[in-house]
Every structure is written in C-alpha cells, then in structure tokens.
Image (spheres, grey):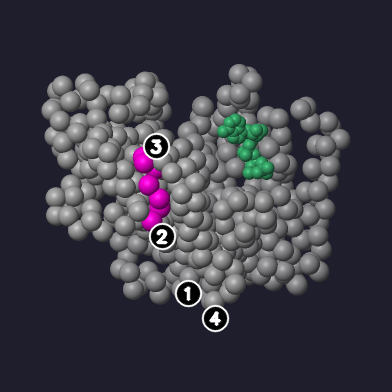
Amino acid sequence: MKVVPSRSSEWVGPVTSQKRASAIIEIDRVSQVFQTSARKDHLALSNISLTIEEGAFVSILGPSGCGKSTLLYIVGGFVSPTSGAAKIKGQAITGPGPDRGPVFQEFALFPWKTVLGNVMYGPRQQGVRAAEAEAQSRALIEMVGLKGYESFYPKELSGGMKQRVALARTLAYHPEVLLMDEPFGALDAHTRTRLQNDLLNIWERDRKTVLFVTHSVDEAVFLSDKVVMMSKSPGCIREVIDIDLPRPRRRNELLLDPRYQKYIVNIERMFDESDEAGAPS
Amino acid sequence: MISPAAVTKRAAPVLACIGLLAVWQVASLGLKNDSFPTAIEAIRAIPDILGDKESLINILASLRRMAIGFGIAVLVSIPLGLLMGRSRAVAAFFNPLLMVIYPVPKAALMPIIMLWLGVGDITKTLVIFLGVSLPVIYHSFEGAKAVEEKMLWSGAAMGLSPLQRLVRIVLPAALPEILTGCRTGLVLALITMITSEMIARQSGAGNILFNALDMGQYDTVYAMIIIVGAMGICLDAVFERVRARLVRWSEPQFDMPLSFS
Ligand SMILES: Nc1ncnc2c1ncn2[C@@H]1O[C@H](COP(=O)(O)OP(=O)(O)OP(=O)(O)O)[C@@H](O)[C@H]1O
Ligand SMILES: [Mg+2]
C-alpha cells in the first residue's frame, strides 16, 4: 500500500515519482476567526500549514463548512488570515493578483457581459490586443464545450454552463496558480467527467499549479498528486495523502486499477472514522 | 406579423388617454362650470400656446433648466451613491446629511435659496438638482451595496485597481438599480421644475400656467396641464426605452404571472 499518511505540520517534500520541484505556495500556521452575528468568535481554520510545489495538482477534500473555501480565499489574497501567513514564491500574499486565478463556487460571472465578453475580460485587462484576446477566448470557449454560445448572456445559461464559462474566464488570463472551488460541483456526471479530462489535459500541457477544492473522493484521487483531507470544527488538516498513480491518467484504465480503488477506499474509511469519533459541533 | 398581445400593449396607453378625455368631456358638460372647460376646449387651446413665440421660449427655458438640473444631479449622485455603497466610511459621512435632507420638500427650501441666489435660473436649477439627487443617490447606493463580492474579487484577480473596479464592475452591475433611480429622478425633475416656477414666477411653463389661472383663462390652464403631462409621458417613455436597451442583460426572461407590469 502506497498511502503514506503524514501529519501536516511535519510534511515537507514530495514523495511522488515526479521530480523534486520548488515550493510555490507556503501556508504557515494560518488560523481564521470569523465574528458571527451572534457576537461569538468562530474558529473556521485552525493552525493550517501546507506547502504546495510548483506544478502540483493538489486537492482539498473535506466536509461542508470545514473551511475549504476560506483557505482558498486566503491563498487568493481575498481574505487576510487572523494569524499566520501565506506566501507565494517566497513573497507574503497581501492581496489578489493575476498570478492566482480563482474559479469561485458561485461562478461570479459578469452578467452584463456575454460569454465571449466574460472570457475576454482578463486578457484585455492584461493588455492583450482585442483581436488576439478574442481568438484565444473563442478557442477556450470551444474547449469547455460552449461553442455557439459566445454571444449569450450569463442569465441565458444553465448552472453547469456558467461554471464552464467561469473556468474559461480564469484560464484566459494564464494565472500561474489555479484556485478552483468545487468547479465541477454543479455539473452532471457526464459533463463532469469530460471537464475533468479536459482539465487534466490542460494541466499536462502547461503544468500549472492547481489547488482544487472538492467534495468528491474519486474526483480528488483521479486528478491529484496530493490530497489534503480536512476535518471540521475547527477546520484543520487531518491527513495529506500522496497519490502515486501514473500519468497521463485515463479514467477507464484507472477505474480498473486496484491502486486507484485502494486510495478511494482508504480515504473514505478515514472520513467514516472521523464521523464515528463524533466531530464536536 | 404583429401578435395580438403586442397590439394590446401598444394600444393600451392610447385607449387609456382617450378614455380619460372622454370622462373629462362628459363630466365637464354635466357640471357646466366656467372654471372647468371641456376636454375639446382645452385641446383647442394647445395650438395657440405652442404657436405663440413667447410661450414656446418659456417652455424651452423650462426644459433647459430641467435638463441641466437633471444632468448635473445624475453626474454627481451616481458616483456618490456608488462610493457610499462600497465604502463604509463614505456612507457614514454622508448618510446623516442625506437623512436630514431626504424628508424636506425641496420646494420648501426655495424661499431660502431665492434669498441667496435670486429668482433666476440658478435657483430653479438648484431646486431641480436637489429633487433629482436623492432618489438617484439612494438607488445607486443600494445597487452598489448589492454587488456580489466574488465579482469584485474576480476583477481584483485580473488586476483591476479599486477605482477600475468601481467604474468597470460596480457601475455596470448596479446599472439596473441606478436607472430605476434615474427614472424616478426624471419625473421628480418635471415636478420640481413646475413647482419652482410656481414659486419664483418669472418665466417657464409653470409661469404660463399660473398666469393663465390668475387671469381666468381656464382653457389655457388645462391646455398647459395637458402639455406638461404629455411632456412627462414622452420623457418617461423615451427614458424607459433607453433603460430597457441598456439593461437587456438583466431583464427577467419569463413573465411573472402575478406581476402587474
Ligand atoms: N464571512 C464569514 N463570516 C462568518 N463566518 C464565516 C464566513 N465565511 C465562512 N464562515 C464560516 O467558516 C466556516 C468555513 O466556511 P467555508 O465557506 O470556508 O466552508 P467550505 O469548506 O468551503 O464549505 P462548503 O464545502 O460547503 O463550500 C463555516 O463554518 C462558515 O460558517
Ligand atoms: Mg466552499
């Protein structure tokens, strides 16, 4: 068995077959306290430490409300942590920047822009000429399977289609790190599988660092080099698991692969154990 | 092909006007009161007013004041409202001020403004400005407050500065709400325009109306009311067309079976 559970605070380098890469994101003892309306402090994240190597695909897996989105916002620079620090390439994160591209759970598309306008927004802001930005954006829209919908407004799209536009919009400005918050959560199984494959293809091609939040165990195992398991109340890292499966990964091959199955069974068992332990609420 | 529904929609306002005039005509014939001319008499007086150079100059002067007052109010109020909606400090600073001004009828301020600025264009334009500002500020404020945070975050990640986010994300996102405020503002501009000319009688459409009243020319009074009313309806209709075009992206796709629009 290749599952190597290790405590987050001790975790340092990669154990995968990949070559050793340098850390791009370092999260150092980050805690986040929210003031709730009941005037009580709510500890959403407790003492999180995590290092992410350049070019790695890392998934964050955990129950609803365990602070996955919050952790992503801190790396994105949208929220500054109550204590601790996050760094990108050794620099303290003080705010958002085009090196980190978020894909939000809520899509957050610009409703006054068409699909094409949304996808072109980032490149145009970055100073790419209109014709070039349009050509790139059209290619991306085709890639996420929305060819023919370029001039539709967001209100005219289904939830899954909006999700795909959000993904294309972020990919369009070439962030070094993708911060994806349950990007495939609202999709049907078929589209989900297709987009997982597309995402992996893009990732194989330009090896962007991806921080990927998900609820789904098999999605996490299928996509990732490393799965970060979080638990709730307060949100903390339970386990960091290296997924040592060959790439490029093919879904139909993996489904038959006993190693893949073992990862899934083990991770699910770990979640069950924590449920039985009775998470304080 | 024009659908029956479209015909009804087009014809409805016309039918309503005709109905109103008919009721007026019958009521006036029935009451036989000197100060209540029939609809036909009032309509007959309209060409006289519009053909008279003096009256025309007056009406155009009114419209000009209204346009200037409305224009400046919109230009000042939208940025102010948006800033208030996005910055707690700005809101905390202006809110008390606006709360004091809000319930005061703007026309009631006229005597004071007249003392300072006279009875000319500036005073009247200022009153129109005050009348238009508040609804536009209020709606811009509410619109800006409601802008989804993740949308601003997305913009920040793309490298938009705070000012760029205000202009290029908050403004368009709040536009439907802002334009609702402007539409209210436009009607208020017309109202304050007439009221201001009623108080500072010197020129304008309101002046013609009240002079006619003083001289007992009741058909002119009613004709002026029709003219001013028609102006309001036309302005509102034109504005509504522009508005609908600008915010096509936000209009609901389905007719709500229980709405009365
Ligand atoms: N702005 C906020 N104010 C107060 N509490 C907050 C705020 N944002 C998040 N929280 C709390 O922090 C905790 C973590 O929230 P978060 O959205 O990060 O969870 P999550 O893991 O992304 O959940 P999900 O899988 O349902 O998206 C929750 O208990 C939530 O109530
Ligand atoms: Mg979340």
Mark 4 or mark 3, which is nearer the start of the sequence?
A: 4
Q: Residues within 10 Å of mark 2 (few under 14, many from 20)?
A: few
Q: Which of marks 2 and 4 is in front?
A: 4
Q: What residue is shown at x 14% (from left), y 34% (from top)?
A: B120
Q: Give the distance between the C-alpha atoms of the residues marked 2 and 4, in whole angstroms.
A: 22 Å
Quarter containing ligand 2?
Answer: top right
Image coords of residue B226 (percent x, y) = 35, 50
Kindly identify the amino acid type of the residue bearing the numbered disc 3.
Pro
Q: Is B36 part of what is drawn in magenta?
A: yes
> Could you tell me which secondary element the residue under label 1 belongs to?
helix
Residue B1, which numbered label? Answer: 4
Kindly identify the amino acid type of the residue bearing the numbered disc 1.
Ala
Residue B115, which numbered label? Answer: none
Q: Give the distance between the C-alpha atoms of the residues marked 1 and 2, in whole angstroms.
A: 36 Å
Q: Is A26 part of what is drawn in magenta?
A: no
Residue B108 seen in this snapshot:
yes
Residue A2 seen in this snapshot:
no
Residue A139, which numbered label? Answer: 1
Q: Residues within 10 Å of mark 4 (few under 14, many from 20)?
A: few
- Seen in the picture, residue B151 relative to A86 is either above or below; the reply is below
Kindly identify the amino acid type of the residue bearing the numbered disc 4.
Met
The residue under label 3 is B135
Label 4 lies in what chain? B
Q: Give the distance between the C-alpha atoms of the residues marked 3 and 1, in whole angstroms.
A: 44 Å
Stretch in magenta: B34-40
